[in-house]
Image (cartoon, helix red, strand yellow):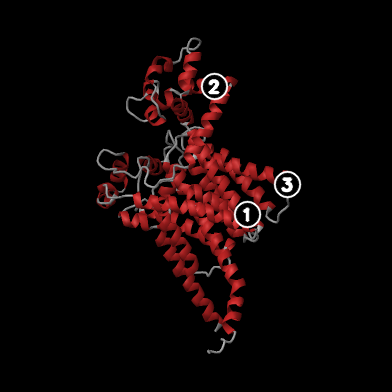
Amino acid sequence: MNRQFSYLQQRAGVFWGALSILTLLTAALYNGFPLVTSDTGTYIFSGLHLQVPLDRPLTYGLWLRLTSLRHTLWGPVLAQSVVITYLLLRSLATWAPRLQPGLGRWLVVAAVSWGSGLPWFVGQLMPDIFTAIGVLALGLLWLRPRLAAVETLLLLGLVALAATVHASNLVCYSVLVGLVGGYRYWSHQSSPVVQRYWLTTAVVLAGWVLLPALHAAFGGGFAASRGSHVFLMGRLAETGMLDRVLHDQCQNHNWQLCQHRAELPDNAVDFIWPTESVLNRTGGWEGSRAEYTEILGVVARTPRYYPVLLEEALQATGRQLVHNKVGDGLTRQVENSNAFWKIQESFGYELKEYTNSLQNHNQLHFDDLNERYTLLLVLSGIGLLLVWASGQLRPDARAWVLLVVVALVLNAAVTANLANVLDRLQARVVWLLPFVACTLLVQHGLLWWHRLRPRFRLVADEPSPPMV
């Protein structure tokens, strides 16, 4: 009998797990094809041709190569859904143990999926979902009391993958492990998971060697990012700092940019991407490296620029924190787009499915979702404040909330100041806030109900007064 019951439990677990995976794929299924952006084609080409891109790591291209089996682009988004489902369910088991396995946990996944942008990032052929994957994996590694050795290795592998698919992730996680290590040192706190903290720190910091080594192995040179000088220069142009630097320094330097000072655009996108951009007129990605690196060095060595840089950094971080709209970059990508060409070249038998997607007919609309999302974020913030103020949160749950909040702020700071202020870059990770809020509110709602239920029973069992 017990064996049969255990078998039925396993079958039920597989069913609810599969349903969660499908729930997270609803955006791609609704679209009719995995979602793409203007960057998707570069990832496809880099992975299938094993070439390091100029403007991004090779790692996600390799992920596409492996999970697509060079056969279908549904493979990568399915794999992303499986990974996220695993992390969500393990997080629910850790911080909402009173919640019924199966239906109860699926309802949380479904609610967060309906109210946030989570499925729209799971279903994208982009590395954006891995930012949250790394944060969830770090939370389990640092805060879950017991983990099997195999699961520890799996989570460490996910952290390593997430750290190296996007340069901003590597920076965020490095700062995060530093902050956690500093807090542990100054508070003199010990923990049964201290060994896992040091393992995680080693994995994250090793990314600064492993990613350049990966690029070097495929002929891209020993560098974590081949285009960091371009993105940083674009950021200086966007803040107006580049114009000031050129005004101050051109009389002492023979930089090509001095000839184009009057043509500097107002934003980083126009500085980098148009065919006739300032970047392309000053040497392109590779030809500009020496000059741009020299200018960045001048800025770094000039203290009078620091107050302006700090002010701009704080402003950009604040703006990025509130730029959370879903749908950024999910525009029509056909005919003359890079994504279309690369899918036609490498997955030609899926081209009709791709061109017939709702995205490529401009039939994806996000106004209603973004209204729900904004309301959900506000309610999540209020809910977390109430639960925190109740004093009923376990120490590990408080640490989980702090970890996610700090990760959201770091993501905003890094992406806004090393790249651009874009909705996509914060929306990819801010859905963690509703997930954490929902998890803890459900856990404590069940706890309060468990405490109050005997009182309701006593009231119900009292005899009714006689009728007059």
Q: Nearer the viewer, mark 3 or mark 2?
A: 3
> Disc 3 or 1, which lies upstream in sequence?
3
- Residue 15: image location, x then y, percent: 44, 69
- Judge whether 111 appears above or below 458 on screen: above
302 relative position to 342: left or right:
right
> Disc 3 or 2, which lies upstream in sequence?
3
> Disc 1 or 2, which lies upstream in sequence?
2
Q: Quadrant of residue 79?
A: bottom left
For residue 187, the mark is 3
> At numbered mark 1, what does the secondary structure look like: helix, strand or loop?
helix
Q: Tell me if residue 35 can be seen.
A: yes
Q: CA distance from mark 3 to mark 1?
A: 15 Å
Q: Nearer the viewer, mark 3 or mark 1?
A: 1
Looking at the picture, which amino acid does disc 2 mark? Val
For residue 398, the mark is 1
Front residue of 433 and 275: 433
- Residue 273: image location, x then y, percent: 36, 30
402 relative position to 44: left or right:
right
Looking at the picture, which amino acid does disc 3 mark? Ser
> At numbered mark 3, what does the secondary structure look like: helix, strand or loop?
helix
Few, some or many residues within 10 Å of mark 3 (<14, 14–19, 20+) = few
Image quadrant in which the N terminus is located: bottom right
Looking at the picture, which amino acid does disc 1 mark? Arg
Q: CA distance from mark 3 to mark 2?
A: 36 Å
Q: Nearer the viewer, mark 1 or mark 2?
A: 1
Verify CB contact (< 8 Å) between mark 1 and mark 2.
Answer: no
| Residue designated by label 2 | 299
Verify CB contact (< 8 Å) between mark 3 and mark 2.
Answer: no
- Judge whether 257 appears above or below 151 on screen: above
**Residue visible at 66% across and 48% down?**
198
> At numbered mark 2, what does the secondary structure look like: helix, strand or loop?
helix
